[in-house]
Image (tube, rainbow, N blue to C red):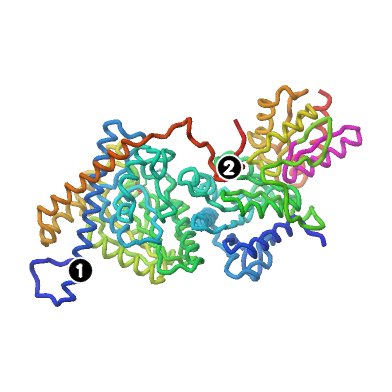
């Protein structure tokens, strides 16, 4: 048996629906025989009647409904058709779900699934990575699984957590990643993973950029550099101690993300390492992100807009020479 | 129907009982209105005396609408009030001391100094805590009602309120539409108090009446004179009953004038002299008092007693909250999620 990242997300949801009567899925086109724009809920409406529901094109209200249901004890999963459209639900996610526990002492166990990140030809409004934005606000947990196994176990964990979770699933990984089997248990949420061990430089990454970073590490290995690659797994909470532990071994840090460059996850990683681990650094830490323009449509432009393995390797080379 | 207690033909036993029940309900609503007016006058004077941090937002002129909103709800229902709903919150069972605690930031209040004034609630008890963003609570009530339906609960409703200003947000549109799509037992009471902060109706919407939107959303709609307590009670009672009975969601549009500033910081000088002469500019509390006197529903001494009793309750609530400890930043738990081990370790 071989499963894709997308199938792992579907399987996780099937298991959740099967095991927990409080779970329901709410989103555009998720129900009926259609099963979602990407087929992440394929067949689930039939298998779980009345629990996989199509909604109007109302991201704000979809999320509001999930919040209200969660306050009454349900465990809703909201599927945004594309992460980009969650901008319409920002208010509900940030101001309603994100403030509820702090204000009223009643947590809001919703999971909002965001099909995220760039794929060829998708353009400015179907390609965004919004994890930095959600991570900026208090009250939310932000997951960015990079492997089939994590896609599966982290989604199951997301639903078991009593607080709101923004689950960023990468569309590029949907079909590109495969695994032989699904694990019954994953690493604890909030813990980063050393995806490749090395001594010369630490690349901190997550989601699809993990795979570009691993490819860059391979490229550099041919030049006899020994690169360590960290997969953050969740960007909030951010596992600062695993990152610092790695930098303590390598003395050099490059943080790589696919979201826009101003602020964000990579800036946060650099800030934490600079302020808490300055003495560990042998060179100024560096970061690589998408460019500060909307995400372009044409593949010639798109492939230069996001960090590629070659761009990551080039940046790492400069850092290794310092 | 509210009828005179003195005049009219002799009633049959059951007619007389029904009339008495209606009178009793009217007087109960009046007492919630009175308590609210006196309490909010106290809050306003405390604000002017610098004893309340942040803002004070009162529902002067809106008490009849609001009291009626709270009175037909019962335990197990969901109430998502907004800015001018002190009367309805009280009628639904929120203790006065919790209001004082929230305004004064008491650590023992429902919001523990973390949020203030009207941004309060106890979601575990069906009193949702509004966020400021207007329209955002409508879909939240829809979700809570869906959860109750899934659990197999029966005979429940949700009621939420909104101003004519808040009726214009995208969130309100999405919320009303999804309520009708999910066909939940929801009542939305929209009060047109003719200003959103300082902006008059003609810069807010261009349809003839907001109730016309009911049809567009698949709601049943009603208009009512928000200065007339009996009209408020009858209309909202009907709407709540119909929602409970499984009719489509209900939209009630009330017309009043806001008789105070947007908040106590606001002198509402933008309210024109002309609009102050409109019938909808009457004070619902005074109208109710005239009605009580004219119909002989209660004598003056009784009304005076109610007032004294309300004042005592107000003073007691405020005094209690004033004695309680304020939040302490050093002891505060600065973690915004309940899963403590997942709090981000940032300095
Ligand atoms: C989405 C949003 N925008 C702006 C505000 C700021 N604001 C608070 S109350 C208010 C006026 C609301 O008018 P209305 O809905 O008619 O209610 P009223 O205050 O008249 O009772 C405004 C603009 C807000 N709370 N929410």
Residue A71, image x, y percentages = 49, 55
The foreground one among B26 and B112 is: B112
Does residue A297 sit above or below B217 in this rendering?
above
Q: Which residue is mark 2?
A: B340
| Mark 2 lies within 8 Å of ligand 1 (Cβ measured) | no
Is A217 part of what is drawn in magenta?
Answer: yes
Can residue A311 be seen by looking at this rendering? Answer: no
State the SS at label 1.
loop
Residue A186, image x, y percentages = 73, 50
| Mark 1 lies within 8 Å of ligand 1 (Cβ measured) | no
Q: Is residue A4 left or right of residue B239?
A: right
Residues shaded magenta: A204-230
Does residue B149 sit above or below B89 in this rendering?
below
The quadrant of the image that shows the C terminus of chain B is top right
Q: Which residue is mark 1?
A: B1
Tell which circle, 2 or 1, labels the residue nearer the N-terminal end: 1
Q: Residue at image x 76%, y 28%?
A: A248
């Amino acid at each position: 048996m071989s499963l894709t990242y997308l199938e792992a997300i579907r399987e996780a949801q099937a298991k959740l629906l099967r095991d927990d009567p409080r779970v329901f899925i709410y989103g555009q086109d998720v129900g009926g025989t259609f099963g979602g724009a990407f087929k992440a809920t394929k067949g689930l409406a039939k298998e779980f009647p009345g629990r996989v529901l199509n909604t109007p094109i109302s991201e704000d209200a979809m999320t509001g409904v999930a919040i209200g249901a969660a306050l009454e004890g349900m465990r809703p999963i909201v599927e945004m058709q594309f992460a980009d459209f969650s901008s319409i639900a920002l208010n509900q996610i940030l101001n309603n779900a994100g403030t509820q526990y702090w204000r009223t002492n009643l947590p809001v166990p919703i999971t909002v699934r965001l099909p995220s990140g760039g794929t060829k030809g998708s353009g400015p409004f179907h390609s965004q990575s919004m994890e930095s934005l959600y991570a900026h606000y208090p009250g939310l947990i932000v997951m960015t699984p990079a492997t089939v196994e994590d896609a599966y176990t982290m989604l199951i964990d997301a639903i078991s957590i009593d607080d709101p979770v923004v689950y960023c699933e990468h569309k590029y990984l949907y079909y590109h990643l495969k695994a032989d089997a699904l694990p019954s248990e994953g690493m604890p949420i909030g813990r980063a993973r050393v995806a490749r061990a090395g001594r010369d430089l630490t690349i901190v990454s997550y989601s699809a950029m993990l795979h570009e970073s691993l490819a860059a590490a391979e490229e550099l290995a041919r030049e006899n550099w020994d690169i360590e690659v960290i997969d953050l797994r969740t960007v909030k909470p951010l596992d600062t101690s695993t990152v610092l532990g790695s930098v303590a071994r390598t003395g050099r840090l490059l943080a790589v993300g696919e979201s826009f460059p101003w602020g964000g996850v990579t800036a946060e990683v650099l800030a934490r390492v600079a302020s808490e681990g300055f003495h560990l650094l042998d060179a100024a830490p560096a970061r690589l992100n998408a460019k500060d323009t909307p995400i372009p449509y044409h593949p010639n432009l798109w492939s230069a807009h996001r960090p590629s393995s070659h761009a990551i390797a080039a940046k790492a080379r400069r850092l290794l020479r310092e | 129907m509210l009828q005179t207690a003195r005049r009219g033909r002799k009633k049959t036993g059951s007619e007389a009982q029904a009339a008495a029940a209606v009178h009793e309900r009217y007087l109960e609503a009046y007492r919630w209105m009175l308590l609210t007016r006196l309490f909010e006058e106290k809050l306003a004077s405390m604000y002017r005396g610098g004893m309340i941090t942040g803002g004070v937002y009162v529902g002067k002129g809106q008490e009849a609408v609001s009291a009626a909103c709270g009175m037909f709800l019962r335990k197990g229902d969901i109430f998502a009030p907004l800015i001018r709903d002190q009367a309805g919150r009280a009628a639904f069972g929120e203790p006065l001391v919790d209001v004082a605690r929230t305004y004064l930031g008491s650590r023992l209040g429902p919001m523990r100094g973390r949020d203030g004034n009207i941004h309060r609630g106890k979601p575990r008890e069906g009193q949702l805590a509004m966020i400021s963003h207007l329209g955002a609570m409508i879909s939240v009530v829809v979700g809570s009602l869906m959860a109750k339906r899934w659990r197999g609960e029966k005979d429940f409703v949700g009621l939420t309120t909104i101003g004519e200003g808040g009726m214009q947000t995208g969130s309100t549109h999405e919320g009303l539409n999804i309520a009708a799509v999910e066909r939940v037992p929801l009542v939305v009471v929209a009060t047109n108090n003719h200003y959103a902060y300082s902006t008059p109706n003609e810069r807010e919407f261009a349809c003839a009446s907001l109730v016309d939107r009911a049809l567009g959303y698949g709601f049943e709609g009603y208009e009512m004179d928000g200065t007339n307590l009996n009209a408020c009670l009858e209309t909202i009672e009907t709407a709540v009953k119909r929602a409970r009975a499984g009719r489509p969601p209900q939209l009630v549009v009330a017309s009043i004038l806001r008789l105070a500033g947007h908040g106590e910081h606001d002198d509402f000088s933008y309210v024109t002299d002309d609009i102050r002469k409109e019938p909808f500019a009457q004070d619902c509390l005074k109208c109710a008092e005239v009605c009580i006197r004219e119909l002989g529903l209660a004598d003056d001494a009784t009304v005076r007693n109610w007032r004294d009793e309300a004042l005592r309750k107000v003073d007691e609530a405020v005094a209690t909250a004033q004695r309680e400890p304020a939040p302490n930043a050093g002891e505060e738990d600065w973690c915004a999620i309940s899963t403590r081990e997942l709090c981000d370790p940032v300095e």
